[in-house]
């Protein structure tokens, strides 16, 4: 068995419980912290974003971090990359590490791309000649040969992300720590990066990577780690971890404390996702109506507001109910106000994670009374086979595909026309026997 | 476990390893839980330093050369000329060189804050990566104000060559004065960068604070003008000693400084620099900690 390259032992990261205070005493406390007169540590009762995480990564091994946004993946990656300190715990790295957590990090804005790459090569312990050699290789991989002699401040975030991945992959670091930067900003180039991973692993490099792309997860790595609320929930075979991670469930956001948004005009007092019978949903199957019930508490009367509810998949919004478009607005809202929005027939792909977002605007259409927030999330139930996809590869899941299923057909000399139609969705009886989800 | 980079494969000692080890207790919050280990080889460190110096000069001078020329040459020259013009006896008494050299020392202090320590704030994205240590960037940034000080002194000496000013003094005094201004400025700049990390608006307030420091430093007036406060001010403000020392570097018309004033000013400036470096180290090694 190969040597360990990255060992995280008992990693805990805590942040202060209370929101940032204002006032003279808070300012003086911060000033003392800046001046080095106060340690500025977080007390043990602080909110834990990472809680006693143990993780070992061996040379030539890759592990994927999966989990909902805000579960602590990026904080763990930053700790592994040495960018932030853990509150407690030990990080050990064999042979140097490099990271791609934020595309802008690690670049001197006044130097050219070429100078920056040489600088990073020198920082990684390479000779000048070797740094220059690899600089060409990185530029060629990142497809930016033409603009390598321009100052880095002129580069877009996408180009910086490409360059950062190239620098991480082709310089001397043995442990690569990578967030889902390319997933977000350059999905096409990401395919090229993913294709490079087996080569990097063959060179004995170790990769710790976060992803939201469940479709590619099994192709990328045999090992996945599900981070849930800062803890390792499951660490094991990617197929099993994703199966557990994508178990049907419905999660609603906690209600807001008073006075958080828009000067305290509105507060989210309750959210629930309802099923066809008007009861709290535990699971949604493809084609099920989705009802979002929102309870607001308003401190003043608001005339003719605009409500906005949208449903988003991993790569952005897919459906929205917007009073800006339909013009269906309540004459006024006041006090405790409840509104329900139902998406009658949205055929969402099975085993995918979706979020529900909500926003509230005043009558002028621009004043924000409640900024757009994720108020709930759910993972759809069912399976590809259960939805009428019969090919072997679709037996288990439709991962990485589009989040919405739409009727489509093929026309070919063989004569087959219809390929998938929503009539293939399972009947009510089949859904009920398929098993329910969980509600948290 | 070995903490060396793979650079050894290339027959060269590694320079800046990103290998590190975090030590922290499992049941309490450690004061220092993070320690970065940088393994350096002199040649590669010098090359990295050279690139960083190039970057700092490009950022501060080459990116906007006309603005730099205005800020560093034209405006100070116009200031010296205008103040000398107001004081009708100045040319006859040879006061402009005294004003110019004191102004150059203050400008070294201001540049050390702006282009030196504050570089940690301006290039904070560079530091949000484990590769480049803040110390190396700081060393590179410190050379910009020192280079500009050299230009200022050269211009003053060119002016002296063309004038009938009775030259004297010891050049070592100017070096000491420059050292005091640069170290104090770097320390204050680091502190300003740390403050900007917490309150980004501080970066906009800084020029006004620097202007206030110009009034508190005996550039447009002599230390003797403070009468009873002279001794106390000389001990409290190292820049006042630095300006008088610089005047003594080009002329015999020096003012007697209080006993041990130079030693105390040197100690002050070194203490400010050490404090700045200390503040840089304790709460956060990089500028990433505030942005969890």
Image (spheres, coloured by chain):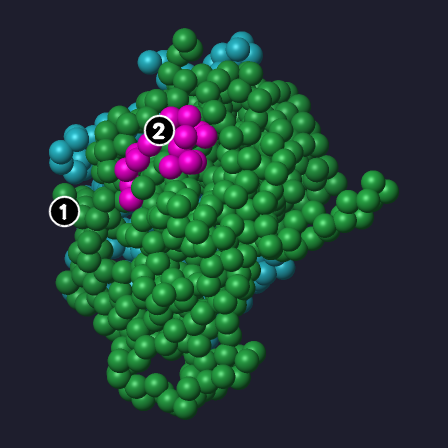
Chain colours: A green, B cyan
Camera-nearest residue between A250 and A254: A250
Camera-nearest residue between A23 and B217: A23
Q: Residues within 10 Å of mark 1 (few under 14, many from 20)?
A: few
Residue at the image point whose x is 23% and y is 67% from the top: A257
Q: Which quadrant of the figure has residue A347?
A: bottom right
Give the magenta-colored segment's residue range: A229-244
User: Which label number is shown at residue B171?
Assistant: none
Taking A227 as reference, is A254 above or below it? below
Residue A360 picture location, percent across and down: 41, 76
Marks 1/2 same chain: yes
Residue A325 picture location, percent across and down: 56, 78
Residue at the image point whose x is 28% and y is 68% from the top: A270
Q: Disc 2 designates what residue?
A: A235
- How far apart marks 1 and 2 lie (CA) works out to 27 Å
Res. B238 in view: yes
Q: Residue furthest right?
A: A413
Taking B204 as reference, is A195 above or below it? above
Q: Point out the tag, 1 or 2, that comes first from the N-terminus.
A: 1
Q: Is residue A185 magenta?
A: no
Camera-nearest residue between B199 and B225: B199
Residue B185 picture location, percent across and down: 36, 49
Q: Residues within 10 Å of mark 2 (few under 14, many from 20)?
A: some
Residue A439 picture location, percent across and down: 30, 52
Q: Is residue A242 magenta?
A: yes
Q: Disc 1 designates what residue?
A: A45
SS of the residue under disc 1: loop
């Amino acid at each position: 068995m190969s040597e360990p390259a990255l060992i995280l032992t008992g990693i805990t990261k805590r942040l202060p419980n209370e929101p940032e205070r204002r006032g003279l005493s808070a300012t003086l406390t911060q000033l003392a912290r800046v001046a080095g007169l106060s340690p500025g540590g977080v007390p043990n009762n602080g909110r834990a974003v990472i809680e006693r995480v143990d993780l070992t990564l061996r040379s030539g091994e890759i592990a994927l971090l999966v989990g909902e946004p805000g579960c602590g993946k990026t904080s763990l990656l930053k700790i592994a990359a040495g960018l932030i300190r853990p509150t407690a715990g030990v990080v050990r790295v064999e042979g140097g590490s490099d990271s791609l957590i934020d595309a802008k990090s690690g670049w001197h804005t006044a130097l050219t791309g070429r100078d920056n790459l040489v600088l990073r090569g020198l920082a990684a312990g390479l000779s000048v000649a070797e740094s220059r050699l690899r600089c060409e290789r990185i530029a060629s991989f990142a497809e930016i040969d033409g603009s390598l002699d321009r100052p880095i401040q002129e580069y877009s975030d996408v180009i910086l992300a490409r360059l950062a991945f190239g620098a991480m992959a082709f310089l001397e670091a043995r442990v690569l720590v990578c967030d889902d930067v390319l997933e977000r900003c350059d999905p096409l180039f990401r395919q090229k990066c993913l294709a490079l991973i087996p080569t990097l692993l063959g060179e004995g490099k170790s990769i710790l990577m976060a992803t939201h792309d469940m479709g590619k997860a099994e192709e990328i790595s045999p090992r996945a780690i599900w981070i849930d609320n800062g803890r390792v929930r499951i660490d094991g075979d990617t197929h099993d971890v994703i199966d557990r991670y994508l178990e049907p469930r419905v999660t609603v956001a906690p209600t807001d404390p008073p006075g958080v948004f828009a000067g305290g005009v509105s507060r989210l007092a309750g959210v629930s996702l309802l099923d066809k019978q008007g009861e709290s949903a535990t699971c949604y199957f493809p084609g099920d109506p989705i009802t979002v019930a929102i309870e607001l508490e308003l401190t003043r009367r608001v005339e003719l507001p605009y409500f906005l509810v949208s449903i988003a998949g991993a790569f952005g919004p897919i459906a929205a109910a917007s009073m800006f478009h339909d013009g269906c607005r309540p004459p006024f809202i006041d006090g405790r106000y409840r509104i329900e929005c139902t998406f009658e027939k949205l055929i969402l792909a099975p085993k995918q994670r979706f979020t529900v977002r909500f926003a509230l605007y005043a009558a002028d259409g621009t004043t924000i009374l409640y900024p757009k927030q994720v108020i709930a999330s759910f993972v759809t139930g069912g399976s590809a086979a259960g939805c009428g996809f019969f090919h072997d590869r679709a037996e288990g899941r439709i991962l990485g595909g589009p989040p919405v299923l739409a009727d489509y057909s093929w026309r070919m000399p063989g004569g087959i026309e219809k390929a998938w139609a929503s009539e293939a969705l399972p009947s009510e009886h089949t859904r009920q026997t398929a098993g329910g989800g969980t509600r948290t | 476990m070995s903490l060396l980079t793979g650079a050894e494969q290339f027959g060269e000692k590694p320079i800046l390893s990103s290998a590190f080890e975090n030590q922290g207790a499992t049941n309490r919050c450690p004061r220092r839980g993070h320690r970065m280990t940088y393994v350096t080889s002199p040649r590669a460190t010098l090359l990295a330093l050279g690139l960083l110096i190039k970057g700092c000069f490009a950022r501060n001078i080459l990116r906007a050369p006309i603005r730099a020329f205005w800020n560093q040459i034209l405006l100070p020259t116009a200031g010296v000329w205008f103040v000398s013009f107001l004081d009708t006896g100045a040319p006859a008494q040879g006061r402009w060189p005294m004003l110019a050299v004191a102004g150059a020392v203050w400008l070294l202090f201001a540049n050390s804050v702006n282009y030196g320590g504050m570089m940690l704030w301006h290039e904070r994205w560079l530091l949000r990566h484990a590769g480049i240590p803040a110390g190396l960037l700081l060393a590179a940034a410190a050379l910009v104000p020192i280079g500009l000080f050299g230009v200022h002194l050269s211009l003053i000496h060119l002016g002296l060559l063309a004038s009938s000013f009775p030259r004297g003094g010891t050049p070592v005094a100017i070096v000491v004065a420059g050292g005091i201004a640069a170290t104090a400025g770097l320390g204050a700049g680091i502190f300003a960068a740390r403050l900007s990390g917490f309150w980004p608006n501080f970066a906009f307030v800084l020029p006004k604070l620097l202007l206030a420091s110009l009034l508190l430093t005996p550039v447009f007036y002599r230390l003797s003008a403070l009468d009873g406060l002279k001794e106390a001010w000389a001990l409290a403000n190292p820049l006042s000693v630095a300006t008088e020392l610089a005047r003594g570097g080009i002329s015999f018309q020096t003012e007697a400084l209080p006993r041990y004033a130079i030693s105390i000013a040197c100690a002050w400036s070194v203490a400010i620099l050490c404090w700045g470096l200390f503040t840089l180290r304790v709460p956060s090694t990089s500028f990433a900690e505030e942005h969890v």
